[in-house]
Image: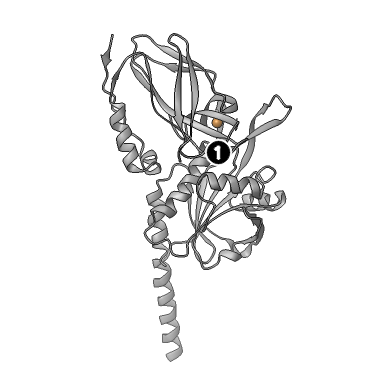
Amino acid sequence: MKKLITLLITLPSFLITLNSCGEADEQQQEWSVSGEGISIEGAWARPASEGRMSAAYFLITNFEDEDDRLIGVRSDVARMVEIHESYEGENDMMGMREVPEIELPANETVRFEQGGLHIMLIQATRQLAEGDTFELTLEFENSGEQTIEVPIRN
Amino acid sequence: MRFTIITSLIILAAILLSACSEPALDDYSDVSYELIDQNGETVTFPDDFEGSPLVVGFIYTHCPDICSFITANVGKVYNEMDNPGDTKFLLVTFDPDRDTPEVLKSYAAAFEMDREPFRFLTGDPDTIDDFMRRVSVRTQESYTRDMDDGERLYFLSHSDKILLIDQNSRLIFDYGGSMTPVNIIIEDLEKLGP
Ligand SMILES: [Cu+2]
């Protein structure tokens, strides 16, 4: 069954200023979509040279009436691929930690974005330059797996 | 009598002038840190930058989320300024053991910032330690990963900072590095004048 959900995504201003405004606008339209199952939109990752770190970001929308869960990520683009979140700790320090799984409540969007949830790519297995893409497989508890193409950009 | 009038005028002028400029949070003209840039060239902070306003971010290259954000923000300040003039943009690592000039160079290239007016700086660990203490950038090992080849990767919790320093090496503003909108930094820079 195909359903329509209007997603009103208000980007925090820091995200808008960070990306070029045009891009942010385009994505905002793209995200007000209908869909079914688990939908992954707006994926991108930072450039990195071989052996270095990168992070990937996207929005996951669960169009199902049942909650789901992101339980794993994998890719041959890095030696280790983990679900991470950045958080503010003691003394105003920012840290990051691994998150074993992410709840995907029914009919909601979960944002992987800078300064928050990200897919951590530890030691890239090749050069990731602007314009390149790589495949990332996401594993869901109820909906199986999905492989997406992630473009590299700044 | 005449002396008193002139003195009063000078004092008055000084008061008026100081009211126009931003009060400094700190003054770095009493320090001198010998650092190395991404090309292996020695750079002395702040002496080599006297006369230029400075935007300074603090990063380590093993951090692809927050620190990429800080680095991109510093790049964006330059790209979006109408008239950057003499302003210099520095990214200083607090992980000098791993962030060698070569590592910083490829990191800078990934952000298309391996060029003037950007400098990516590292140094010997003691110097970096002193520098970070002076600018109140704190770091702490947060978590580690053992790679299958036996390498132990560590990650750091750290202060999230961008500093604005004026032409006379005085600290004018201290921003949350990843969260401060770029246009606010640009406005503050423009207040410093040419
Ligand atoms: Cu991470």
Q: Residue at x 71, y 30 (%)?
A: B152
Quadrant housing the N terminus of chain B? bottom left
Question: Quick check: which quadrant has ligand 1?
Answer: top right
Q: Residue at x 50, y 44 (%)?
A: B70
Q: Is residue B178 visible?
A: yes
Residue corresponding to mark 1: A48
Vertical position of residue B170 compared to residue A100: above or below: below
Q: Residue at x 52, y 67 (%)?
A: B168
Foreground of the two, B14 or A56: A56
Foreground of the two, B150 or B110: B110
The amino acid pointed to by label 1 is Ala
Residue B43 place in picture, x, y as percent: 63, 60
Q: Count residues near mark 1 (Cα–Cα under 10 Å), then give few for <14, some for 14-19, many for 20+.
A: many
Residue B32 place in picture, x, y as percent: 65, 62
Pinpoint the chain carrying mark 1. A
Vertical position of residue B153 compared to residue B42: above or below: above
Foreground of the two, B73 or A30: A30
Residue at the extreme bottom of the image, as rendered = B2
Foreground of the two, B135 or B121: B121
Total numbered labels: 1
Residue A44 place in picture, x, y as percent: 44, 32
Quadrant housing the C terminus of chain B? bottom left
Vertical position of residue A23 compared to residue A73: above or below: below
Residue B120 place in picture, x, y as percent: 58, 52
Q: Element at badge 1?
A: loop
